[in-house]
Image: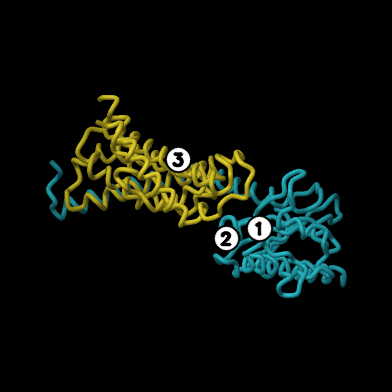
Chain colours: A cyan, B yellow
Amino acid sequence: MAKESSLKNMVITLLLITFISGAAVGGVYSLTKDSIAATKLAKVNNSIAEVVPEFDNNPSEEQFTQEDLIFYPAKKGDELVGMAVSSYTNNGFSGRFDIMIGFRPDGTIHNIVTLEQSETPGLGAKIADKQKEGGKPVFTTQFIDKNPASYRLVVTKDGGDVDAITASTITSRAFTEAVQKAYDGFMKLQNEQNKK
Amino acid sequence: MKLSDLTKGIIKENPTFVLLLGMCPTLATTTSAANGMGMGAATMAVLIMSNLVISLIAKFIPAKVRIPSYIVVIASFVTMVELLMQVYTPGLFDSLGIFIPLIVVNCIVLGRAEAFASKNGPLSSAVDGLSIGLGFTLSLTVIGAVRELLGSGAIFGQTIVETEGILIFVLAPGAFLVLGYLLVLFNMLKKKVVK
């Protein structure tokens, strides 16, 4: 016993339904907006804490962008103890992925975590594996304590020092490219600072 | 209202193994038991809410615009579920990714709205949504558990067998394989149980 499908009825019905739905979705959006922003911020802050040495400031508040890299300075008092750099590559197996690299002031890598990736599970996705306490080393473990000034950020297949993930050369190459980009950006910053 | 109204979605009208609907999210999100269960739960939430609302307004909708109207209602609920998941279940939101908004085009949801909710009262429609949703969730959880166990030796993240796992089960071909075999097993069992 649906209403008769006259033009007037159809227009009014659709208008009403879309208006009410729009209002309802808008309502839920404004209710959740702040929580979602807070969750996103917490995610970034957790990644920063995982990649740089201990700090007592708020790196995300002091963040700045330079050439599409985002820098989060970690300080103890007024002294810089580390720099977390959000870098990315578009050459992943499934396109873009983002990683966060933590450098010590002299350029040595402290740690790396993956922020967002859609590489193949079980293969390229292993870049996101985290080493457990006393567990087996993972792909990112080899970068810790290495200084890219002497450690060649290229996979061994291409003549470098990085052990690629088995059967995931493309992902591994893209990963090292992102780390190199971050290192170059950070060193450029440090050099500009030192000149002052 | 009989108990069978609640349980029909689990065996007799199981959306995955009997109705064979919603195959795309089934194959894509069952990489682990937790992902499968999360996807099923999100879909069930949308099913119950959209069935309820649609059964209430179906009488007032002219027949020629009923599909667009139902879709708008379903899409609104999916968007609300998505926003709430971003707040309360961020890990699951990240793993399910694009498949959450794709619930809108999941045949099960529009199918139940058109076939059941538009022709029945609000309470039975809500129960229908719950029943089909439960069946969907259980099916996805089982498929996810099998694929996770074979693919990485764990279920719900708990390691059962220390093993590197058989990679294919975490990828698309494995999804088809597991679904196919479980389809056979389920229907064999169903024949025995449902006289």
Q: Are marks 1 and 2 in contact (CB under 8 Å)?
A: yes
SS assignment at label 2: loop
User: What residue would you read off at disc 2?
Assistant: A119
Residue A84 position (above or below residue B163): below
Query: Where does residue B109 sit, x and y in percent of width and height?
Result: 32, 45
Which residue is label 1 attached to?
A127
Where does the image place residue A175, in percent across and percent down from the top left? 67, 65
Residue A147 in picture, x, y percent from top left: 83, 65
x, y percentage for residue B16?
35, 44
Q: Is residue A169 above or below residue B91?
A: below
The answer for how far apart the CA atoms under marks 1 and 3 are is: 28 Å
Label 1 and label 2 in one chain: yes
Q: Amino acid at mark 3?
A: Val
Q: CA distance from mark 1 to mark 2?
A: 9 Å
Q: Which mark is drawn over residue B142?
A: 3
Q: Amino acid at mark 2?
A: Glu
User: Does residue A111 lie above or below A181 as drawn?
Assistant: above
Q: Nearer the viewer, residue B161 or A107?
A: B161
Q: Residue at x 26, y 49 (%)?
A: B69
**Quadrant the N terminus of chain A occupies:** top left
- Relative depth, front residue between B129 and B16: B16
Q: Residue at x 23, y 39 (%)?
A: B116
Circle 2 residues within 10 Å: few <14, some 14–19, many ≥20? many
Chain letter of disc 1 in the image: A
Q: Secondary structure at mark 1?
A: helix
As helix, strand or loop, the secondary structure at mark 3 comes to: helix
The answer to whether tags 2 and 3 share a subunit is no
Badge 3: chain ID: B
**Residue B64 left/right relative to B46:** left
- Report the amino acid beneath label 1: Ile
